[in-house]
Each structure stands twice: as structure tokens, then as C-alpha cells.
């Protein structure tokens, strides 16, 4: 008999070479798995938020400030196709039958933010999103919210009760 091991018997040299050659392959598989899971997680996040929020589905580009969206009052729905971003301002509408409420959002001014308390005919409104006031402009209820990052205006129609506009303002939350 010879001292040569048969090809079926592992030697320390065979084991070491197999370990070295399988290590890069294993790292490649792990890296690929991380990329796939990350892509799936990001895709799920956007799918979930677009499914819940029609405004995000309408916008072609994302603004450079946080968006807010209300928990809609009973019987109100998002007006499909109303969401748009023009000149740095996001516009969208919610409706209940013939009653439409328009909402606009823009980045809060950093150099001289508006002093909501100085608006004549407006009263303070306690809301979680930030400082807010409610009043009327041309006999239409208006709420103005100033968060740390976003300036939001909610405009009802003449036939919209101010408590509806107030409810919308109180239920605005960051997306």
C-alpha cells in the first residue's frame, strides 16, 4: 500500500483549501441577502405608505419638508388627483359631497416666521402638530398651523362649518 490518501479521504490541505474558497462565496451570499432584504424593506415601506395615503401616491416628487395629513372627519375622502407640488408648495383637497376643503403645505420660513397671534379675527387652537389659529377669510373658515418644519393652511368653503376645519387641523399628523 502507498502512503497517498485516497481522493475520498479528506486531508488537512484539502479542508483548508475548501474553507478558503468557500469563504468569499459565503460572504457574497450574505451581502446579496442583505441587499435583497433592504430593497424589500424599502419597497414595503413605500407600498404601505402609498396604500394608506393617497396624497403620497399623487405626488410625483417628494417635497424637501415633512408632510402632514389629517385623520379625515366622517364622510370626508381625499379628492383623487388633487395632490400636487408646485413652486415648493404641496396642494391637495378633501371632500364630502359638494363640500371641498383645500389644504396647502410649504416649508416653514426660517427667517421671520409668521406671528399667528397677530392675525386679527383669529383665535388660538390647541393642536399636537404645532402652533395654530382658526378664523375666517372672506366668510370661509381658515386654520393656519405652524410646526417646526411646515406651514399648513386649511381653507374651507363658505358652507363648511368652522368646527370641521378645526377638527381637520387638530387631526393633522406628520407622514
Image (cartoon, rainbow, N blue to C red):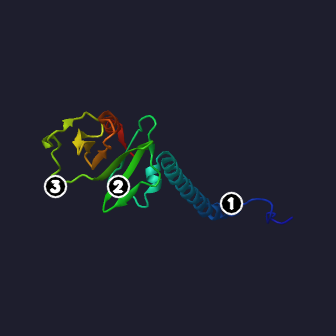
x and y, in percent, of residue 71 in the image: 41, 38
x and y, in percent, of residue 134 in the image: 24, 38
Quadrant (top left, top right, bottom left, bottom right) of the N terminus: bottom right
The dot on residue 90 is 2
Q: Secondary structure at mark 3?
A: loop
Distance from Cα at disc 3 to Cα at disc 2: 20 Å
The dot on residue 71 is none
- Nearer to us of marks 2 and 1 is 2
Between residues 174 and 36, which one lies in front from this camera angle? Answer: 174
Is 47 located above or below residue 166 in the figure? Answer: below
Indicate left or right for 36 with 105 as reference.
right
**Residue neighbourhood size for the residue with mark 2, other residues' Cα within 10 Å, grouped as few (<14), some (14–19), many (≥20):** many
Q: Secondary structure at mark 1?
A: helix
Q: Quadrant of residue 157?
A: top left
Q: Which residue is drawn at the image coordinates 25% and 33% (left, top)?
A: 126
Is 44 located above or below residue 19 in the figure? Answer: above
Q: Quadrant of residue 16?
A: bottom right
Quickly name the residue at label 1.
15
Q: Secondary structure at mark 2?
A: strand
Q: Which residue is drawn at the image coordinates 19% and 38% (left, top)?
A: 122
The dot on residue 111 is 3
x and y, in percent, of residue 63 in the image: 35, 57
Distance from Cα at disc 2 to Cα at disc 1: 63 Å
x and y, in percent, of residue 121 in the image: 16, 39
Distance from Cα at disc 3 to Cα at disc 1: 68 Å
Which badge, 3 or 2, is on the more N-terminal residue?
A: 2
Amino acid at each position: 500500500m502507498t502512503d497517498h490518501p485516497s481522493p475520498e479521504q479528506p486531508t488537512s490541505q484539502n479542508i483548508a483549501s475548501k474553507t478558503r474558497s468557500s469563504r468569499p462565496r459565503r460572504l457574497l451570499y450574505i451581502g446579496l441577502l442583505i441587499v435583497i432584504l433592504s430593497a424589500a424593506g424599502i419597497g414595503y415601506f413605500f407600498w404601505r405608505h402609498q396604500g394608506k395615503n393617497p396624497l403620497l401616491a399623487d405626488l410625483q416628487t417628494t417635497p424637501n419638508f415633512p408632510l402632514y395629513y389629517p385623520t379625515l372627519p366622517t364622510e370626508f375622502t381625499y379628492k383623487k388627483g388633487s395632490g400636487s407640488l408646485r413652486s415648493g408648495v404641496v396642494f391637495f383637497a378633501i371632500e364630502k359631497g359638494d363640500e371641498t376643503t383645500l389644504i396647502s403645505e410649504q416649508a416653514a420660513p426660517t427667517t421671520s416666521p409668521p406671528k399667528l397671534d397677530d392675525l386679527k379675527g383669529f383665535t388660538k387652537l390647541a393642536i399636537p402638530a404645532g402652533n395654530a389659529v382658526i378664523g375666517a377669510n372672506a366668510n370661509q373658515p381658515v386654520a393656519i398651523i405652524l410646526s417646526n418644519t411646515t406651514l399648513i393652511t386649511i381653507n374651507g368653503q363658505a358652507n363648511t362649518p368652522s368646527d370641521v376645519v378645526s377638527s381637520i387641523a387638530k387631526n393633522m399628523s406628520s407622514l
